Image (cartoon, helix red, strand yellow):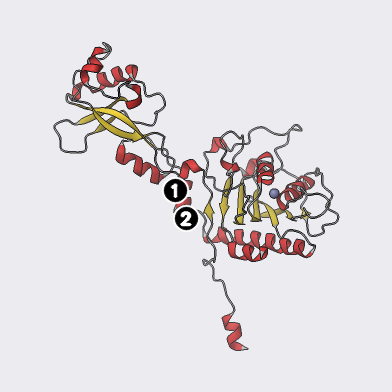
C-alpha cells in the first residue's frame, strides 16, 4: 500500500500540467507586411526640416502615420540621414530620379542625394516581435502593450492566479460530468467575478433537452441574468446548474482590475442596457471546458464578458479555431481569450 500512496500525483505549488496561451488577433500574430518606397540620403543635414516640410506636402504618406520620415544612416556613408520620399505606388512609372521630383516644380530637392528603393512596414507594429522586425527595415513608432508581450512570452499569469484558474475549470469539468450523466453534451461552464473570486453561475450543456440553444455558455449567461433578477430559460430540470444572487453590479470595479490584452478604451463600459444597468456579464470571466461556437461567442459579446478561458478547441470553434469573434474590429465589444487551461482533462471529458 505504501508505494501506491507515494505514487499518487501530488501537485506542488507552481507546477501545472497545462499552459494557457492567449488567442490573439491575426493582426498581432502575422508577419510584418512591407511596402516599397523611395528614400534618399540627406547630404546637407541643415536642410532636414525644410525637406521634411516639402515632402510632407508633396507626399503626405497619409496611411503610414507610424513611419518615421527620417532615419539616421546606419552604414558608414558620407551622409548622416535618410528620408522617405514617397511610396513606389505613388509614382506612375515606378522610377524616381531627383529630376522627376524637381520637374514637379513643388520641391527643389536641395540637399538630397540620389533616391534608392527601400521596404518599409505597411502597418504599425502591435507586438514587440513585429516591432523588432519592422525596425530592421525602417524606424516606426510602437506603443508597447506589456500584457501582449508578457502573454506571448508565456508570463501572463503567476502561480497563485493559475491555481485559481484551475479551481474554476475543475468546477466546469465537474458540472460537465453531471450533465454527461443526464445524457447531455459533456461541456461545462463557470462564470466568475474576478474582483471577488466568487462563482456567479455554473452550468452544463442542456442542448439535448427541449431547447437546442441551451449550450453550456448560454445556460451560464442566463443563470447570471437570474442572479440579477432576470433570466429567460427554465432550468428546473437541471439541478446541477445554479446561480448566485448578486446585489450589486461588479462591473465598475471589476473592469479596472486584472489584466487586459487590449487598450482600455477598447473595452470600457460602453453604454448600459435599457434599464440603465451594465450588461449582464460586465467585468466577469468565463471558464468553459470546450471552445464556444459562434452563437455562444456572440452571446458573450452581447453580455460583455471580460475574459474567456477554455480548455480544448472545438472543430467549429469561434474563439480561435474557425473564427476569432473576440477580436472582430467591427464589433463594439472585445474580450480576451485564453486556451489550453486543463486541456488534457477536458479532452478526456469528451472521449
Ligand atoms: Zn455554443
Residue at horizontal 24 percent and vertical 33 percent from the top? 72
Q: Position of residue 224 (x, y in %)?
A: 74, 47
Residue at horizontal 23 percent and vertical 23 percent from the top? 48
Q: Position of residue 142 (x, y in %)?
A: 39, 37
Say whether disc 2 or disc 1 marks the residue closer to the N-terminus.
Answer: 1
Residue 96 shows which numbered tag?
none
Element on which disc 1 rests:
helix
Distance between the alpha carbons at the discs numbered 2 and 1? 8 Å
Residue 149 shows which numbered tag?
1
Name the residue nearer the viewer: 263 or 41.
Answer: 41
Element on which disc 2 rests:
loop
Q: Which residue is mark 2?
A: 155
Residue at horizontal 24 percent and vertical 17 percent from the top? 100
Q: Is residue 53 left or right of residue 111?
A: right
Q: Give the farthest residue toward the left.
A: 78
Specify the quadrant of the image occupied by residue 288.
bottom right
Circle 2 crowding by C-alpha within 10 Å: few under 14, some 14–19, many from 20: few
Residue at horizontal 63 percent and vertical 53 percent from the top? 291
Name the residue nearer the viewer: 351 or 79.
Answer: 351
Q: Position of residue 274 (x, y in %)?
A: 75, 31
Amino acid at each position: 500500500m505504501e508505494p501506491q500512496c507515494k505514487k499518487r500525483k501530488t501537485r506542488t505549488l507552481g507546477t501545472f500540467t497545462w499552459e494557457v496561451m492567449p488567442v490573439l488577433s491575426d493582426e498581432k500574430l502575422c508577419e510584418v507586411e512591407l511596402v516599397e518606397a523611395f528614400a534618399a540620403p540627406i547630404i546637407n543635414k541643415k536642410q532636414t526640416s525644410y525637406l521634411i516640410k516639402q515632402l510632407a506636402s508633396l507626399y503626405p504618406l497619409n496611411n503610414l502615420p507610424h513611419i518615421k520620415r527620417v532615419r539616421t544612416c546606419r552604414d558608414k556613408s558620407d551622409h548622416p540621414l535618410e528620408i522617405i520620399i514617397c511610396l513606389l505606388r505613388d509614382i506612375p512609372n515606378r522610377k524616381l530620379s531627383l529630376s522627376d521630383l524637381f520637374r514637379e516644380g513643388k520641391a527643389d530637392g536641395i540637399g538630397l542625394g540620389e533616391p534608392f528603393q527601400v521596404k518599409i512596414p505597411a502597418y504599425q507594429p502591435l507586438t514587440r516581435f513585429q516591432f523588432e522586425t519592422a525596425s530592421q527595415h525602417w524606424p516606426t513608432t510602437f506603443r508597447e502593450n506589456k500584457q501582449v508581450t508578457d502573454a506571448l512570452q508565456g508570463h501572463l499569469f503567476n502561480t497563485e492566479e493559475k491555481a485559481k484558474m484551475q479551481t474554476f475549470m475543475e468546477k466546469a469539468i465537474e458540472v460537465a460530468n453531471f450533465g454527461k450523466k443526464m445524457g447531455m453534451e459533456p461541456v461545462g461552464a463557470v462564470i466568475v467575478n474576478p474582483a471577488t473570486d466568487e462563482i456567479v453561475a455554473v452550468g452544463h450543456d442542456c442542448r439535448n433537452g427541449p431547447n437546442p440553444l441551451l449550450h453550456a455558455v448560454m445556460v451560464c449567461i442566463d443563470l447570471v441574468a437570474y442572479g440579477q433578477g432576470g433570466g429567460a430559460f427554465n432550468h428546473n430540470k437541471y439541478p446541477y446548474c445554479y446561480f448566485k444572487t448578486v446585489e450589486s453590479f461588479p462591473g465598475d470595479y471589476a473592469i479596472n482590475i486584472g489584466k487586459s490584452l487590449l487598450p482600455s478604451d477598447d473595452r470600457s463600459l460602453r453604454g448600459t442596457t435599457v434599464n440603465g444597468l451594465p450588461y449582464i456579464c460586465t467585468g466577469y470571466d468565463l471558464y468553459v471546458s470546450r471552445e464556444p461556437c459562434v452563437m455562444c461567442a456572440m452571446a458573450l459579446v452581447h453580455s460583455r464578458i471580460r475574459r474567456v478561458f477554455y480548455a480544448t478547441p472545438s472543430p467549429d470553434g469561434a474563439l480561435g479555431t474557425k473564427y476569432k469573434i473576440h477580436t472582430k474590429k467591427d464589433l463594439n465589444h472585445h474580450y480576451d481569450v485564453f486556451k489550453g487551461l486543463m486541456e488534457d482533462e477536458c479532452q478526456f471529458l469528451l472521449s
